[in-house]
Image (tube, rainbow, N blue to C red):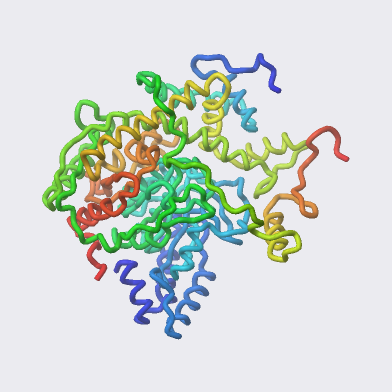
C-alpha cells in the first residue's frame, strides 16, 4: 500500500498511527542488523507521537497529509535535542538546538519521525562506505553498496523499514542510491526545499529531496517539504508546485531528449555504461514514445565536463563550510596546548579520509596561484553547462539518461580508488551544477537482477512535467502509481 | 603568515603541496597518509585537467544556480534579547552542545602565549 493511501486510512480512523509505526519498528528489528540503514531509531518518541496523532483523530481532528506516516531523515538534518552526526566522529555527542525547516514541515503535516539514517560522512561519497558508523548494505543484495551518500535513506525505504525518507543531493546523493536500491528518488530545483538546518556540504549545490516506493508518495512528500522559507535566503519565493494533481496527465505531446553524452551513446558518449543499463534506458524511451511523447537522441556536449567542474567546485565550497568543525562549538574536541593545535588535533581525529581528501582538494583549488586555473575555470564550465541545458530545453520539455552507469557494485570495489568512485555520479552531477530538478525512477533490472534507475531531467521549476513522465514510466513497470484514488 | 618558500609550485601536485594544504586546513597527516593522499589528489586533478581543452575566454563564471541578489529582512532582533527567557534558554542549549564553555562563552585553550 502506498504511504498516500496509508495516510488516508489514518485520517479516516481505519488504521491507527500506532499500528503503522509498530509495523515498521518490527521490520527494523528484523532486518536492521543486516542492512545498517539507521544511525538512530527513535522508537519511543515515534510511538509517543503516534499515540498523540491517534488521539487527535479520535477527537475528530485532521493531523495532515502525512498522518501517522513514518519518515526517516538523513543524519545531516538537524533535529532539536536528537543527535545529528553527519556520519562523522567530529559531531560526537552534539545535539542541535533547533529543527531543520523540513523537520518542522513534517511535524506540521502529521508525519512521525522514525530515525536518522546512515550516510557517507558529510554526504561525501557514492556508496555509504565513508560513514564513521560502518557501511550500509543494499537490501536487494547485501554484498553490494546501496549507493550514496544518502544510502541509509534509500536502503531504509527499499527494506520496508519506512515508507518515506529524506535525503540530500549535492551531486547525485539522492538519485544514485535510489537507482541502486530500486526506489524513487527526487532532487528538486535548487531552492525549492529549504536548506535551513541541513548541515552544509556545498551550499550552491545541496538540495533536500524525498525517497519513496512510488511516484505518488514522492510527490506527496515533496509537496509537504517544498515552498518558500524566510530562514533560507536561497529559497525560491514561490508556493510549492501541485504534483499530486498532475500525476495522471500523461506525456502526450511532451518532447523528450535522450542525452547521448551521459547515456554512453553516440560519438561523444562517455565510457563505462553497462549494456543492460543502456537497454533499460532504451525501453524507457520507447515507453514514453508509446504514451505519446516525442523522443529522440540529443547532445548536451558540456555535460561531459560536469564531473571535472564538480570535483573542484564542491570540494572548494566544502573546504570552507567544514572549517567550522574546529573543536570549539560542536561535538568532539581533542585537547592540546593551544587553540591552533587543538583545532588540528580535533579535525585529524574527527574527519575520515574522504572528508580530508575533499577538504585538501578544495583548499588546493582555492589557494593562491591555483584559484584561476581550477576554481575560476570550473565556474566557467558551470556556465557552459547552464547554457547547453538552456539550448536543449529550447527543443525539449524533458531530458532522459540512466541515473547511474551501472547497477549496485560490490562493497569495497571502489573504496580505495576515489576517482573510480566519483565516476558513479557522472549522470547526476550536471543537474546540480545547473540547479535543475531531476529524479530517478526504477525501471526493471540489469543482467545481475539488480535494480536499474532511469533519470528524468527537467528545467528549473519543471517538477510537474518531470513527475508526469515518472508516473508513465512507473506504470509501465507495474509500480504503485495510480493509487491516488 | 606562511613563509614564501613554502608556497606551492605549479605542475603536478607534489607531496610538499599536500603537506602545505593539509597545514592550511588544520589536518595532521602521517607520512603514509601524505603519500596516499598525494597520489589520489593527483588522479583527481589529472581528470580535472580535461577542462583545459575548453575555450573559456570571455565566459562569465557561474557561482550560483539562482539569479539571486541579496535578500534582506527587517533589522529587528529575531530571537530576543538577553532579558528574554526563551533566548537565554536557547543560548544555554547552544553552549551545552559545545565541548567546553564558561558563563556565556565558548572556552578554548590559549590562543597566544601562556595560559593565564
Towards the viewer: A296 or B21: A296
Total residue callouts: 0
Residue B49, image x, y percentages: 41, 21
Residue A256, image x, y percentages: 20, 43
Residue A296 is drawn in which quadrant? Answer: top left
Quadrant showing the N terminus of chain B: top right
Q: Is residue A333 left or right of residue A84?
A: right
In the image, residue B109 sits, relative to residue B103, either above or below, namely above
Residue B54 is drawn in which quadrant? Answer: top left
Q: Residue at x 78, y 41 (%)?
A: B109
Towards the viewer: A143 or A434: A434
Towards the viewer: A237 or A112: A237
Residue A277, image x, y percentages: 23, 41
Residue B4, image x, y percentages: 67, 15
Looking at this view, name the residue that lies furthest to the right: B116
Quadrant showing the C terminus of chain B: top right
Q: Residue at x 42, y 84 (%)?
A: A60
Q: Residue at x 52, y 59 (%)?
A: A40
Amino acid at each position: 500500500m502506498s504511504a498516500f493511501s496509508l495516510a488516508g486510512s489514518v485520517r479516516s480512523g481505519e488504521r491507527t498511527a500506532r499500528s503503522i509505526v509498530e509495523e515498521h519498528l518490527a521490520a527494523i528489528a528484523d532486518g536492521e542488523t543486516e542492512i545498517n540503514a539507521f544511525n538512530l531509531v527513535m522508537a519511543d518518541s515515534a510511538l509517543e507521537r503516534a499515540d498523540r496523532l491517534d488521539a487527535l483523530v479520535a477527537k475528530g481532528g485532521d493531523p495532515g497529509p502525512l498522518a501517522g506516516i513514518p519518515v526517516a531523515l538523513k543524519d545531516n538534518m538537524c533535529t532539536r535535542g536528537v543527535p545529528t552526526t553527519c556520519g562523522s566522529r567530529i559531531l560526537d555527542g552534539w545535539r542541535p538546538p533547533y529543527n531543520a525547516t523540513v523537520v518542522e514541515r513534517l511535524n506540521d503535516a502529521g508525519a512521525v519521525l522514525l530515525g536518522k539514517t546512515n550516510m557517507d560522512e558529510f554526504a561525501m561519497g557514492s556508496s555509504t562506505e565513508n560513514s564513521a558508523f560502518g557501511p550500509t548494505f543494499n537490501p536487494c543484495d547485501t554484498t553490494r553498496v546501496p549507493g550514496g551518500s544518502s544510502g541509509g535513506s534509500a536502503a531504509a525505504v527499499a527494506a520496508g523499514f519506512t515508507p518515506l525518507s529524506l535525503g540530500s543531493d549535492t551531486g547525485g546523493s539522492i538519485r544514485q542510491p535510489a537507482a541502486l536500491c530500486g526506489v524513487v528518488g527526487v532532487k528538486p530545483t535548487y531552492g525549492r526545499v529549504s536548506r535551513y538546518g541541513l548541515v552544509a556540504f556545498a551550499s550552491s549545490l545541496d538540495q533536500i529531496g524525498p525517497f519513496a516506493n512510488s511516484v505518488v508518495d514522492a510527490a506527496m512528500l515533496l509537496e509537504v517539504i517544498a515552498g518558500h522559507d524566510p530562514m533560507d535566503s536561497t529559497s525560491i519565493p514561490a508556493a510549492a508546485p501541485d504534483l499530486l494533481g498532475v500525476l495522471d496527465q500523461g506525456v502526450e505531446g511532451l518532447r523528450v531528449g535522450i542525452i547521448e553524452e551521459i547515456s554512453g551513446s553516440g560519438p561523444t558518449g562517455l565510457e563505462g555504461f553497462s549494456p543492460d543499463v543502456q537497454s533499460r534506458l532504451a525501453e524507457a524511451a520507447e515507453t514514453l514514445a508509446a504514451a505519446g511523447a516525442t523522443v529522440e537522441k540529443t547532445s548536451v556536449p558540456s555535460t561531459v565536463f560536469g564531473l571535472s567542474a564538480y570535483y573542484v567546485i564542491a570540494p572548494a565550497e566544502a573546504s570552507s563550510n567544514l572549517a567550522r568543525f574546529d573543536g570549539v562549538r560542536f561535538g568532539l574536541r581533542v585537547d592540546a596546548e593551544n587553540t591552533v593545535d587543538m583545532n588540528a588535533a580535533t579535525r585529524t581525529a574527527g574527519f575520515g579520509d574522504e572528508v580530508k581528501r575533499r577538504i585538501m582538494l578544495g583548499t588546493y583549488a582555492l589557494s593562491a596561484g591555483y584559484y584561476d586555473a581550477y576554481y575560476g575555470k570550473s565556474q566557467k564550465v558551470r556556465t557552459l553547462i547552464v547554457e547547453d541545458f538552456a539550448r536543449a530545453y529550447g527543443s525539449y520539455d524533458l531530458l532522459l539518461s540512466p541515473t547511474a552507469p551501472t547497477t549496485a557494485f560490490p562493497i569495497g570495489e571502489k573504496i580505495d580508488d576515489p576517482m573510480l568512485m566519483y565516476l558513479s555520479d557522472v549522470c547526476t552531477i550536471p543537474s546540480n551544477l545547473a540547479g535543475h530538478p531531476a529524479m530517478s525512477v526504477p525501471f526493471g533490472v540489469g543482467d545481475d537482477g539488480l535494480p536499474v534507475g532511469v533519470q528524468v531531467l527537467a528545467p528549473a521549476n519543471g517538477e510537474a512535467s518531470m513527475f508526469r513522465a515518472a508516473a508513465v514510466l512507473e506504470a509501465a513497470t507495474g509500480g504503485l502509481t495510480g493509487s491516488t484514488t | 603568515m606562511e613563509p614564501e618558500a613554502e608556497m606551492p609550485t605549479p605542475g603536478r601536485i607534489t607531496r610538499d603541496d599536500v603537506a602545505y594544504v593539509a597545514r592550511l586546513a588544520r589536518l595532521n597527516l602521517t607520512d603514509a597518509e601524505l603519500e596516499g593522499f598525494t597520489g589520489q589528489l593527483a588522479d583527481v586533478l589529472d581528470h580535472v585537467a580535461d577542462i583545459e581543452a575548453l575555450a573559456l575566454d570571455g565566459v562569465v563564471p557561474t557561482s550560483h544556480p539562482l539569479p539571486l541578489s541579496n535578500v534582506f529582512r527587517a533589522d529587528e532582533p529575531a530571537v530576543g534579547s538577553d532579558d528574554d527567557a526563551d533566548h537565554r534558554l536557547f543560548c544555554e542549549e547552544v553552549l551545552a552542545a559545545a565541548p567546553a564553555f564558561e558563563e556565556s562563552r565558548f572556552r578554548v585553550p590559549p590562543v597566544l602565549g601562556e595560559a593565564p
